[in-house]
Structures are given as structure tokens and as C-alpha cells.
Image (cartoon, rainbow, N blue to C red):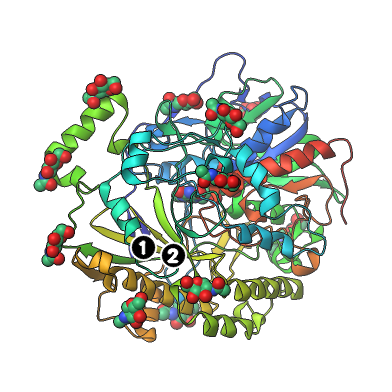
Amino acid sequence: MLYLPGLLFVASFGFGHLAVASRGAGWKVLSRATDVQSTYDFVVIGGGTAGLTVADRLTEDGKTTVLVIEHGELLDSPLISTVQGGMQGFSSQLMYSINSVPQVNLRNHTIAVLAGKVVGGSSAVNAMMTVRGTAEDYDRWGSFFDNPSGWNWEGMLPYFKKALNFVPPNADVAEESDIRYNQSFWGNTSGVYTSWPSYQYPGTKAQIDAFKTMPGVDFVSDSGSGRPGVYWFPQFMDPKNVTRSYARTGHYDTIKRDNYQLVAGSKVLRIRLDGNVATGVEFLSARANSTESPVLVTARKEVILAAGAIHSPQVLQRSGVGPRKVLTAANITTVVDLAGVGQNFQDHPMVQMLVSFRNFTFTPSAQDLFTNASFRHWADQVWAANKTGPYSLATGNAAAWLPFPVISSRFAEIADKLAAQDPGTSLPPDTDKGVVAGYAAQLKSFAAAMRLNNTAFYNLGLTGGSSNGIIVDLHPLSRGSVNIDPEDPEGEPLVDYRALTNTVDIDVMTEIMRYTRQYYFNNTATAGWAPRELSPGPKIQSDGELAAYLADTLSPTEFHPAGTCAMMPKELGGVVDQELRVYGVSRLRVVDASIMPTLPGGNTCQTVYAIAEKVSVQQCYLCTSLGTRT
Ligand SMILES: Cc1cc2nc3c(=O)[nH]c(=O)nc-3n(C[C@H](O)[C@H](O)[C@H](O)COP(=O)(O)OP(=O)(O)OC[C@H]3O[C@@H](n4cnc5c(N)ncnc54)[C@H](O)[C@@H]3O)c2cc1C
Ligand SMILES: *[C@@H]1O[C@H](CO)[C@@H](O)[C@H](O)[C@H]1NC(C)=O
Ligand SMILES: *[C@@H]1O[C@H](CO)[C@@H](O)[C@H](O)[C@H]1NC(C)=O
Ligand SMILES: *[C@@H]1O[C@H](CO)[C@@H](O)[C@H](O)[C@H]1NC(C)=O
Ligand SMILES: *[C@@H]1O[C@H](CO)[C@@H](O)[C@H](O)[C@H]1NC(C)=O
Ligand SMILES: *[C@@H]1O[C@H](CO)[C@@H](O)[C@H](O)[C@H]1NC(C)=O
Ligand SMILES: *[C@@H]1O[C@H](CO)[C@@H](O)[C@H](O)[C@H]1NC(C)=O
Ligand SMILES: *[C@@H]1O[C@H](CO)[C@@H](O)[C@H](O)[C@H]1NC(C)=O
Ligand SMILES: *[C@@H]1O[C@H](CO)[C@@H](O)[C@H](O)[C@H]1NC(C)=O
Ligand SMILES: *[C@@H]1O[C@H](CO)[C@@H](O)[C@H](O)[C@H]1NC(C)=O
Ligand SMILES: *[C@@H]1O[C@H](CO)[C@@H](O)[C@H](O)[C@H]1NC(C)=O
Ligand SMILES: *[C@@H]1O[C@H](CO)[C@@H](O)[C@H](O)[C@H]1NC(C)=O
């Protein structure tokens, strides 16, 4: 069990025996660190979602040599491949073991920090929901620069299309559940697939339809349209064998090129800097004995850091690139004093509002797999025969993603409160001036977005069940940090969500809970379901009571860590420029969820793939003219 305050996730420990994959001839998985060549064109740190995507694209010419160094192993396991329920990958066998520091505003709870530690990274363990943010979320990224260069919706759309291979749903299922999609927002060339289950519970359509009576709600024609609303979205699944499609299956397994090598089970300790130039990477094989020293591998062109939002700032700080104060405390010599590294940490907070229906006539639901033997028998049979039926469903394919004015009549008052805030008061008192300035720019952008109907703040998943639960704040305003542990810089970093430190988050989440109540309890379409609120329960009504419920039960994470090596101007606390090059260091880029200056209003994996595709195109252009930034 992984414990999150208020939310229980049953992890499938012991579900299957993990087998370390072996490969035949022609594959370049290096089982021993000593098999590694001394020099490559590019060395990629982290064989996860972004790392494998970039490595695949950079080696497409058959000549450019790339080594990917991944801490986790190359594992074949049903925990990874199984689609059913979407959460088989939530296993401690596939993840880092990290707990946050105590969360002061969450009764000092510590929170499990989930991140994939396996070839494929978090794309190997995630819940498979394929979602994009709204157009405005990506326009915001460019808005922080005086001269934005393609970081907006128009600039991202080609790479969303390149990143995934969209396979439409079965026509009968689409018809029955009224699944809408529009292929003009998708591509069909990537090795990473997104597709649809061959079955939907009838209650899902009913729960979507019940939003039709709610004022101001749009029903957009495709999840990739960049607009908020209630919509269907696909899941990261290979439709041919009905298994997870992820960075490894799409960008590694089927690629046979001698110039693409991967060493698994190897932890990068630091980036080698010669002056301000990144020249290589030091790493240690998990199979190394205690007397072996780290291996140094040289990068002729660039080092690409793709260790994810939890570990990329840690690798930078260990290498001497980061806030001087943090480095000094850990007795690390500062090479580049870069205040933003590890700051601006964000994740989607979520809270549970459990509502059961005493008269939900849309059956069966997922619950019937446990309570109805004949339904279960049918599900077993169609799966065994054809890999169809309920077991082809991951976490669910429908949700509401709604703008703030649609969910809250208090939107203007709350936006005014945010606009009037002194940003510094929500950050630790010793925060760098540039980081504060960047935060101020973000808050200004969100105060504006709160008044508009083009940005989703509210998310409720619709899974067709007789009870529902998780609601998400898509644009949290609190900012945390991920810094090396001064006592143990080589160990796991100190992760501090600093949840609810910006008090406007409490206002927003309170409104989010109240709107969910409107949907269930002030709605002619749901009244006949005879809903009953189990948690927090009808007694919890006032601002203070709802705020206390948040403090008791909020999860500060939906497992979407981002922002810790932000793409922002340096004077706004940024870590990378618009080509994702680290300020003050040449031949070093960061490519992963850490570069997002602000979270998109949606699950993050699709956006990470698109970022990696976008920068790969830029990188090839730059292969001959590598820039140095100071
Ligand atoms: C449990 C869970 C559920 C999620 N559900 C969804 C979902 O349903 N839909 C969605 O869109 N998103 C989801 N996400 C988020 C999404 O998967 C991530 O945002 C995305 O995969 C992150 O990609 P990345 O490249 O930034 O990092 P990762 O894919 O995590 O890759 C980082 C890699 O670097 C490696 N690494 C780290 N440190 C080192 C080191 N020192 N040396 C060598 N290697 C190192 C790691 O082992 C890892 O393989 C979920 C995430 C999790 C954890
Ligand atoms: C949380 O921990 C802090 C620091 O240790 C302490 O000051 C505070 O009283 C604690 N709060 C609760 C609710 O336990
Ligand atoms: C699909 O979206 C495109 C815009 O990308 C639009 O021009 C087209 O009319 C849409 N098709 C349908 C069937 O709605
Ligand atoms: C892939 O997309 C292209 C362009 O949109 C289209 O012409 C082609 O028919 C598609 N192929 C498949 C197999 O869907
Ligand atoms: C946003 O939607 C709400 C609800 O439909 C509506 O009242 C409001 O006028 C809209 N605001 C804008 C700026 O369009
Ligand atoms: C499913 O098929 C893909 C190729 O389309 C392959 O990469 C993957 O390994 C297969 N999954 C399993 C579990 O066999
Ligand atoms: C550790 O590994 C090194 C290098 O492979 C080897 O020379 C040495 O004998 C090993 N030591 C032990 C104790 O196994
Ligand atoms: C700090 O590093 C120096 C040089 O590596 C070393 O001599 C010293 O013992 C270290 N101090 C601490 C407190 O670790
Ligand atoms: C159990 O499932 C079967 C097959 O789907 C269905 O016909 C039956 O009505 C269900 N029974 C109950 C009590 O829901
Ligand atoms: C499997 O699919 C085939 C072909 O569509 C169909 O004839 C058969 O009935 C299916 N098997 C089950 C158990 O549903
Ligand atoms: C119920 O909804 C209507 C219209 O959506 C609204 O005017 C009314 O204030 C709501 N009632 C309560 C008790 O919230
Ligand atoms: C239960 O649902 C049925 C079908 O929608 C409806 O006819 C009936 O009035 C509902 N019963 C209650 C108590 O709401």
C-alpha cells in the first residue's frame, strides 16, 4: 500500500515476478558499465519518457552516437504491460522510494513521491491517461519571454501530433458511448500509441450527460483540441496486443541501431564540467562492487539531462550548478550559481470527495467485477479469447476540465485577491529575487486566466461507477522545492511540495469541492441517482471546515512533478532558455518535465513526449552550431 493522506492506492505487490530482460544480437544494452565506449556524440541522463524519445530521434540518421544511462533496470513485467485498471504499475518494485519532507500545512504528513525507476521511466508506471492542457497553458510558457520562439499552442501542436500514434475507437463502442474525437488533432507515425478500450461502462456516458444541465459547460469534439470542457480521451495503449505503450516500446525496443546504446542499472552521479563546458558524465553501475570507482563517459556534442523533475535538479546541484547556498551547505563547489535549480516545484494537488449513488441504474460498473460473478466470468472470457472487454480499460477515458468562472461565482473576487498578493509572502523568506520575480509573473498570468473561460482549473474524472472521487486543482499556485540533502547529497533529494502555502490554493480548492457538490446535489440529471456524500460529508460546509478537510486529506501530488529546471528568462529564476540549454553552461540541456515553467491543465506525459520531440528537431538543427550561453 502506498499511503497518501486521505487516499488509498492499493499497489499490486507480488503481482508478477520481475524478469530482467536479456537481448539478442544487434541490441546494445550494456549490462556492465565497463562495456561502455569512452566517447559518444550525446550522453543522455535518464532512460525515461523524454530521454528515450530524444535518444531515438537523435540516432535516426544512423550516425550520431548516443548513450542513455538509466538508473532503473530493463524489466519485462506484467506490472508494466497490463492495462487493466491503469494502476498495476503503481508498484514499489518499479519506483524510487522517496518520502517528502513533512508538509507543514498538511498536519506534517509526509507524502510518497512516486517516480518510475525502470527503463521507460514514469511512462512505464503511469495511469495511461492521454491528456493535453489547453492552448492557453502552452501560450503561457512563451509569455514569460520578451521574444518567445515557438513555445505556444501553435508551436506545440505539430509535436503533439508527432509524439503519438492515435488509433480511433471501435465504431460500435464510440457510437454506444457517444465518444467524440477528431483526428485532425493527432498523428499516426509515432511508435508510442494512444488508443481506446474495446469496452466502456454505460455509467460513463450518463455522468458526461449529467454535465449538460450545468451552466457554461462545453463539450469539445476532441481531447486534443486545446479547449476546456467535458470530453473523452484515449489511453497509452498499443491496440495490437492491448498492452501499455510507453517510451521503451515506442522509442527503444523496436529501434535497432548500433549508434543507440543504453546502459541500465546505472546511476549518474554528476555531470563533468570543464570550466563552464559539460564534457561528460560520471556514473556508477548498480552491479559495481564497493571498491569500483565511477565510470566517466565523454560527450562530444552535448550532455542531455532527462532524469525527471525529481532527479534532474539533483544531478545539476551535485555537479555544482544551482543555488550557491544549497551547494555550500552540502560542501559542493559552486561552478555556476543558478538560483532557480530545484525551485518552482509544482504538482497537481488532488482531494477526494466520495459520493455514492443509491439508485444508479447504469450497470454494470467496474464494481461488478468484484460483486457480480457472471459479469466477471464474461469479462474473463472475452479477455482470454480476444483481449477485449472491461480488462482493456485503464484508469478511465472521460473527465470534466472546466474553467474557473464556470465552476465558481466567486471567480472575480478570488482573482482579485491573487492579483493583490505580495508574491514573496508565499515563498520562503530567503528566496532569490529572480525566483520571486518569476513567481510573480506566473501569479499575474494565473490571476488573468482565472477570469477567462479558456483555461481549465477544475478536473473531475468520470469512470461510470456508482461512486466517484478524485478532484484536481489543475493550476496550483503554491511552489515547493527539490534540493539535495546537505547531509547526504548522493542520496535521495529533499522534496518539499509546500502544499497550500499560497492561501489562494485553499480558496480555489474550496470552490472546486463546492462545484462538485453542485454537480451531484443541485442537478436535475443526477437527482434520480440518489447521491449521498460519504466524504467529507454534508456536515462539512463552511470555508473553515472545508479548509480543515483539505489540511487533513489533501494529496499535494497527482504524480505530475514539474518545474524544477524551469524554462524561464534567467532574471526570472529560469534554469534553461527556450532551446532548453542550461544558463551559464555550454553543451548541456535539460529535456523532461522539469523544464515546464508552469503545469499544463492536464496529465503531463503527453506534454513531456511533445517537449522531447520539439527539442530533438531543434537539436539536430543545432548539431553543427552548438551555442554557448552565459
Ligand atoms: C504513478 C504515476 C502515475 C501517472 N499517471 C499519469 C497519467 O495517467 N497520464 C499522464 O499523462 N501522466 C501521468 N503521470 C506523469 C507522467 O508519467 C510523467 O510526467 C512523465 O512520464 C515524466 O517524464 P520525464 O521524462 O520527465 O521523467 P521520467 O519518465 O520519470 O524519466 C526519468 C528517468 O530518469 C531516471 N533517472 C533519474 N535519476 C537518474 C540518475 N541519477 N541516473 C540515471 N538515471 C536516472 C529515472 O529512473 C527515470 O527512468 C504519472 C506519473 C506517475 C509516477
Ligand atoms: C509541524 O512541525 C513543525 C516543525 O517541526 C512544528 O512547529 C508544528 O507544530 C507541527 N505541526 C503540527 C500540526 O504538528
Ligand atoms: C476537426 O477539427 C478541425 C480543426 O482542426 C476542423 O476544421 C474540422 O471541421 C473538425 N472536424 C469535425 C468532423 O468536426
Ligand atoms: C495517417 O495520417 C495521414 C495524414 O493525416 C492519412 O493520410 C493516413 O491515411 C493515415 N494512416 C492511417 C493508417 O490511419
Ligand atoms: C464564462 O462562462 C460563464 C458561464 O457560462 C459566463 O457566465 C461568463 O460570461 C463567461 N466569461 C467570459 C469571459 O466569457
Ligand atoms: C506489444 O507490442 C509492441 C509492438 O507493437 C511490443 O513492443 C510490446 O513489447 C508488446 N507487449 C507485450 C507485453 O508483449
Ligand atoms: C571489484 O571490481 C573490480 C573491477 O571490476 C575488480 O578488479 C575487483 O577485484 C573487485 N573487487 C571485489 C572485492 O570483488
Ligand atoms: C568538505 O569538502 C572538503 C574538500 O573535499 C573536505 O576536506 C571536507 O572534509 C568537507 N567537509 C565536510 C563537512 O564534509
Ligand atoms: C450481473 O452481470 C450480468 C451480466 O453482465 C447481468 O446480466 C446481471 O444483471 C448482473 N447482475 C446484477 C445483480 O447486477
Ligand atoms: C472473439 O472474437 C471472435 C471474432 O470476432 C468472435 O467470433 C468470438 O465470439 C469472440 N470470443 C468471445 C469469447 O467473445
Ligand atoms: C442550484 O443551481 C442553480 C442554477 O445552477 C443556482 O441558481 C442555485 O443557487 C443553486 N442552489 C444552491 C442551493 O446552490
Ligand atoms: C431511480 O432511478 C429510476 C430510473 O432512472 C427512476 O425512475 C426512479 O425514480 C429513481 N428512484 C429514486 C428513489 O430516485
Q: Residue at x 21, y 49 (%)?
A: 367
To which quarter of the image does residue 433 belong? bottom right
Q: Residue at x 53, y 39 (%)?
A: 183
Q: Residue at x 69, y 76 (%)?
A: 440
Q: Residue at x 78, y 23 (%)?
A: 63
Residue 202 in view (yes/no): yes
- Residue 212, x across and y down, in percent: 36, 62
- Residue 482, x across and y down, in percent: 60, 61
In the displayed structure, 281 sits above or below 149; it is above
Label 2 beta carbon less than 8 Å to ligand 5: yes
To which quarter of the image does residue 475 belong? bottom right
To which quarter of the image does residue 107 belong? bottom left
Going by the numbered disc 2, the residue's amino acid type is: Val
Give the camera-side residue of 92 and 370: 370
Going by the numbered disc 1, the residue's amino acid type is: Phe
Give the camera-side residue of 224 and 544: 224
Can you identify the residue that label 2 sits on? 217
- Dot 1 alpha-carbon crowd within 10 angstroms: few under 14, some 14 to 19, many 20 or more: many
Can you identify the residue that label 1 sits on? 211
Q: Is residue 328 left or right of residue 193?
A: right
Residue 306 in view (yes/no): no
Q: Are marks 1 and 2 in contact (CB under 8 Å)?
A: yes
Task: Compute the Cα span from label 1 to label 2.
Answer: 7 Å
Query: In the rendered view of the protein, which quadrant contains the C terminus?
Result: bottom right
1 or 2: tag closer to the N-terminus: 1
Label 1 beta carbon less than 8 Å to ligand 11: no
- Residue 393, x across and y down, in percent: 34, 40
